[in-house]
Amino acid sequence: MNNLVVAFVSFFLATGAVAINFEFDIDAGLALPVENPYEEIAQEYEMNQIEFGSSLNKKPTVKVSNVNSHGLHEFTPISDTIVQSDTKYYSFSVNTTSGLGEFYELLIFITGNICTQPSNVGANQTSLAVYYSFNSSIFTNIEYSTMVLFENGYVQSLADVAVNSNNNESVLYIVVRAPENVNKTATWTYQIGVSQNDLVFQWDDQTWAQFIDSDDDSALVVTGNLTNVQGLNITELNATRSQFSLYVYSNDYRHYFDTLNSSWCAVRNGPALMNPATIESSYTSRQGSLHQQFHLTGLNKSTKYIAYLISDFHGSDFGGAVYRPFEFETLDTEACELIYNLEFCNQIAYSVPATPGGSKEEVRSLYDNQARNLFTNFSKAIQQISCDTEDTAQFSPIKTCSDCISSYKDWLCAITIPRCSTRNITGYTERKPGESRNSFINDIVMPNLSYYEVMPCVNICEAIVRDCPAQFGFMCPTTNETIRQSYYWDNGGQWPTCNYVGKLTVVTNAAFRASMVNWFMLVLSVALTVLV
Ligand SMILES: *[C@@H]1O[C@H](CO)[C@@H](O)[C@H](O)[C@H]1NC(C)=O
Ligand SMILES: *[C@@H]1O[C@H](CO)[C@@H](O)[C@H](O)[C@H]1NC(C)=O
Ligand SMILES: *[C@@H]1O[C@H](CO)[C@@H](O)[C@H](O)[C@H]1NC(C)=O
Ligand SMILES: *[C@@H]1O[C@H](CO)[C@@H](O)[C@H](O)[C@H]1NC(C)=O
Ligand SMILES: *[C@@H]1O[C@H](CO)[C@@H](O)[C@H](O)[C@H]1NC(C)=O
Ligand SMILES: *[C@@H]1O[C@H](CO)[C@@H](O)[C@H](O)[C@H]1NC(C)=O
Ligand SMILES: *[C@@H]1O[C@H](CO)[C@@H](O)[C@H](O)[C@H]1NC(C)=O
Ligand SMILES: *[C@@H]1O[C@H](CO)[C@@H](O)[C@H](O)[C@H]1NC(C)=O
Ligand SMILES: *[C@@H]1O[C@H](CO)[C@@H](O)[C@H](O)[C@H]1NC(C)=O
Ligand SMILES: *[C@@H]1O[C@H](CO)[C@@H](O)[C@H](O)[C@H]1NC(C)=O
Ligand SMILES: *[C@@H]1O[C@H](CO)[C@@H](O)[C@H](O)[C@H]1NC(C)=O
Ligand SMILES: *[C@@H]1O[C@H](CO)[C@@H](O)[C@H](O)[C@H]1NC(C)=O
C-alpha cells in the first residue's frame, strides 16, 4: 500500500517538472484479439495504428487479421468520430506485469475528451456515454457494464481488475454511445485514452498562467513556477519543446467552450486567434523560480482576449491538460510600451512610457542604461561599508550587503522606469507630455501622449530602509499625504494599484497555487478508495 502511494507521488512530481519523459508502450503485443463480429472496424483499426505510430517515429507492427475492434494501447489515445445514436467499440489488453496496483488487483484509468460536438447540443443535454466492462458480452449487451457520461467535454473513470492465475489475460471492453439528435447527421469527434499509470486527459479549474501586462498591441503571460532555477542556464533552455502552450481566442468566443471547457482537445482544435506557432515563448527566472513566458504580439488596442494555457503530455497525440481560461485586455493608446528581459533591471516586465517611434529594443536599452548609470554611484558607496567582514562588524546581524544591494536596485529600477497605463485607476497619476516624473523621461524618452503612471509600491521604499545600513540615511515618507506624492499602496483589485518591483516573498495570487497537487490529490483519493 505504502509503496503504491510513494510511486504515485514521484510520478506526479515528475509530470509537474519541465522535463517530461514518458515511456510509451506501443507494443503491438498489447492488442489481443477480441472476439466480436465487427469486421469493418478492423480496417479502421489498422489506419489508426499507423497514424499514431508515425507521430512517434515508431511504427507498431499490428497483425490486423486477428483484431476485430479498435485496440487501445497504454497512454495512446484514439481519435474517432461518431454520429447520433451510433455505437463504437474498443478494447484494451491489461498488462498484468506493469502499472499501478497490488499483485492481485490492477488499476486502469479511462479518460476522454470531446473535440467537437453538434452545435445544437446545449449544456444540460446528455452527452456521449462511455460503458466499460471486463466481460466481452458488453459488445452484445451493454446492460452489464459501468457507465460514465462526458461532462464539459470530459470523462474519467477508474476500473480495477482482479488478477488471478486462471485468468491472466484481462481485456477491458469499452463502448462509446452517442445520444439521439434531431439532426440525423449530427457528429461528435472525441478521443479516448486508457492507461495503467495515469490520466491521459486532465483538466484543472484553476488558472496556472498569469497575465503580467500589456500595451496597445502586445501582452506578456507567464506560467506558474515550473521548478527551481538552481543549476539551470535559462538561455540554454529551448521553450519550443515545452509541454505548456497558450491558445488565445477573441472575446467573441468567450462562450464558445462553455460546454467543452474541460476538454484539452477542444481548446487545441478551436478557432484560436493565436496558437503556439504564432506566440513567442521563452523561459524566465524573474520571479525567483523558473517560469515559461509567452509574448503575444499583433494584438488590437482596447480589446479583450481569452487565453487558455494547456499542457501536452507528449506532443499533440498523447493527451494533455487544460487549465481554467483567463481574460486580458490591451491598452487604449500607443503611450505605453511593454518591455521585459532587461539586462540590468532584470525584475522589470511591464509597460513603460514610450518613445515616439522607438522600437521595443530602443525603449528597453534607454531605460536600462539610465538605471545602470545611476546605480554606479551607489555601488561605490556600498564598498565603503564593512559588509563582508565578520558577523559582529556587519550593520545588521540578519541583513547582508547583498540584501541591501538587491533592495536598492529594485527601488532604483522602480523609480527610474515608471509603469505606464492608459486606464484611470485610483492611485494612478496622470502625466501629460512634458510633465513626467523626471527630466530623463521628459527630455530623453519624450513621451508625446498622456498616460497614467502606476506609482511604485511604498514597500519597495520600506525594503531599502530595512535592508540597508543606517549610514546611507534612506528614509521613506510616513504619513499618507507624503506617501501619496511618490508612492502608493497595493489595494488589490483587478488592476494593480501600485508598481511592485522585486521578487515577491509571499505569493498570494491564487493563480500560483500548485495545481499539480490537485490532480494528485484527486487521483490519489480515487486510488485509495479502490484499494482500501
Ligand atoms: C508489460 O509491461 C512490462 C513493463 O512495462 C513490459 O516489459 C512488458 O513487455 C509488457 N507486456 C506486454 C504484453 O506488453
Ligand atoms: C441547466 O440546468 C440548471 C438546473 O437544472 C439550470 O439552472 C440552468 O439554467 C440550465 N442551463 C441551461 C443552459 O439550460
Ligand atoms: C459475462 O456476462 C454474461 C452475461 O451477463 C454472463 O452470463 C457471464 O457469466 C459473464 N462472464 C464472466 C466471465 O463473468
Ligand atoms: C497465464 O496463462 C497462461 C495460459 O493461459 C499460463 O500458461 C500461464 O502460466 C499464466 N500465467 C500466470 C502468471 O498465471
Ligand atoms: C447537421 O449536422 C451536420 C454535421 O454535423 C451539419 O453539417 C449540419 O449543418 C447540421 N444540420 C443542421 C440543420 O443543424
Ligand atoms: C518553485 O518550485 C520548486 C520545485 O517545485 C520549489 O522547490 C521552489 O520552492 C518553488 N519556488 C517558489 C518561489 O515557489
Ligand atoms: C549559458 O549558456 C550560454 C549559451 O550556451 C552561455 O553563453 C553562457 O555563458 C551560459 N551561462 C552560464 C552562467 O553558464
Ligand atoms: C529549439 O528547438 C526547435 C525544435 O525542437 C528547433 O527548431 C530550434 O532551432 C531550437 N532553438 C534553439 C535556439 O536551439
Ligand atoms: C484585429 O481587428 C481586426 C479588425 O477588426 C480583425 O480582423 C483581426 O482579427 C483582429 N486581430 C486580433 C489579433 O485581434
Ligand atoms: C468548466 O465549467 C464547469 C461548470 O461551469 C466548471 O465546474 C469547471 O471547473 C470548468 N472547467 C475548467 C477547466 O475551467
Ligand atoms: C481620473 O479619475 C479621477 C477619479 O475618478 C477623476 O477625478 C479624474 O478627473 C480622472 N482623470 C481623467 C483625466 O479623466
Ligand atoms: C493610509 O492609507 C492606507 C491605505 O489606503 C489606509 O489603510 C490607512 O487607513 C490610511 N491612514 C490614515 C491615517 O489615513
Image (cartoon, rainbow, N blue to C red):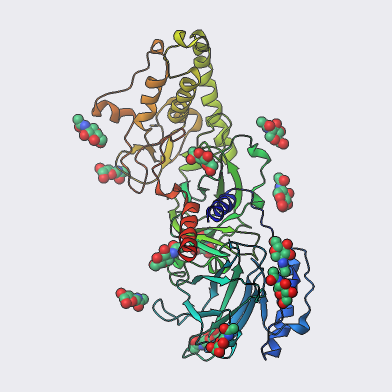
Give the x, y percent position of residue 414: 44, 30
Q: Quadrant of ligand 12?
A: top left
Give the x, y percent position of residue 27: 74, 68
Above-or-below relation of 137 to 451: below
Give the x, y percent position of residue 449: 43, 41
Observer able to see residue 359: no
40 horizontally vs 195: left or right: right
265 horizontally vs 167: left or right: left
Q: Which residue is drawn at 46% across and 7% down?
A: 393
Above-or-below relation of 182 to 420: below
Residue placed most toward the observer, 376 or 438: 376
Give the x, y percent position of residue 456: 38, 32
Residue placed most toward the observer, 262 or 238: 262
The mark total stands at 0
User: In the figure, residue 22 lies in which quadrant?
Assistant: bottom right
Q: Which residue is drawn at 65% across and 76% down?
A: 167
Above-or-below relation of 292 to 305: above
Residue placed most toward the observer, 64 or 287: 64
Observer able to see residue 20: yes
